[in-house]
Image (cartoon, rainbow, N blue to C red):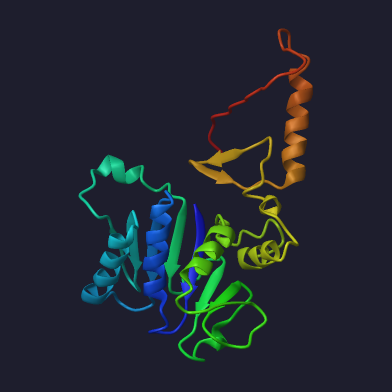
Amino acid sequence: MKLIEFFGPSNSGKTTAISKIAEMMKAQGFSIVTLKSTHHDLNYENDSKDSMNYLKAGSSLSIVIGKNESVLHFPKRIPLFEILNRFEYDFMIIEGESGFPMPKVLFLNGKEGLEWIDDLTIAIVGDAEVAIRKIAKGDFESLYDLVISKAMEPLPGDDCGHCGLDCKTMLVKILRGEKTFNDCIKLSKQPLTIEMDGKRVPLLPFISSIVSDVNVGILKNLKGMNRSGHVKIEFDFKV
């Protein structure tokens, strides 16, 4: 699922833009999740109103995250089993600052909000002299094209440090073309994976290579082993 964030001050047009983009995406056959993030306690009257607008526009799921609670809003009654299998969508648009590293679009209210620009901001919606891409308010076609082309799959977001960077810095470098998702140790495809109690343990590339090479050397000497082919080894023990 690819993510993008729409953020900015109140009354800057975020909700209207998200509703329009959701409608356009649905028309093109994409599935979309909308998420509203706020640092305050949820106001069910106001927040459910925005949530319903997103659902009517075409969002398959609308999520609201408040200071102390979260609400998942489906447009129909969903059996529990189906809920557990529904979290595979093409895009997620988040309204408000989530704190999670992803490309961001800043919506201005006049000039208000310019001070919010950061290294993850890829465009602004409004009229201001800035060095990044500008999209006029109401130009939903350009905003749609931006979302389709610039929304990205998420990094783990846990700042594990195995790559030598935090996740935000890594994403900034990916946006600049200095890094790729393969530079994330957790996301890079390696011949060896280790899980501890169902959770994947990140491995540095040289450790993965050492363990793989040692096992390949042993297996090649086993009777009945072919010289080439796909091999899977599974250990199950307690430490």
Quarter-wise, where is residue 121 in the image? Answer: bottom right
Q: Nearer the viewer, residue 119 or 149?
A: 149
Assign the C terminus to one quadrant of the image: top right
Q: Residue furthest top?
A: 224
Q: Nearer the viewer, residue 35 or 236?
A: 35
Image coords of residue 60 (percent x, y)? 33, 53
Image coords of residue 51 (percent x, y)? 29, 66
> In the rendered view, does 233 fall on the left or right side of 8?
right
Q: Nearer the viewer, residue 173 or 165?
A: 173
Image coords of residue 38 (percent x, y)? 38, 75
Q: Which residue lies furthest to the bottom in this view?
A: 111
Measuring 42% from the left and 48% from the top, which residue is drawn there?
A: 29
Measuring 49% from the left and 91% from the top, which residue is drawn there?
A: 112
How many numbered discs sit on the rendered protein? 0
Image height of 204 relative to 109, above or below: above
Quarter-wise, where is residue 233 in the image? Answer: top right
Image height of 47 relative to 178, above or below: below
Measuring 54% from the left and 31% from the top, which residue is drawn there?
A: 237
Image coords of residue 209 (percent x, y)? 76, 38
> In the rendered view, does 212 fall on the left or right side of 157?
right
Image height of 12 relative to 220, above or below: below
Image height of 17 relative to 192, above or below: below
Measuring 49% from the left and 52% from the top, which residue is drawn there?
A: 1
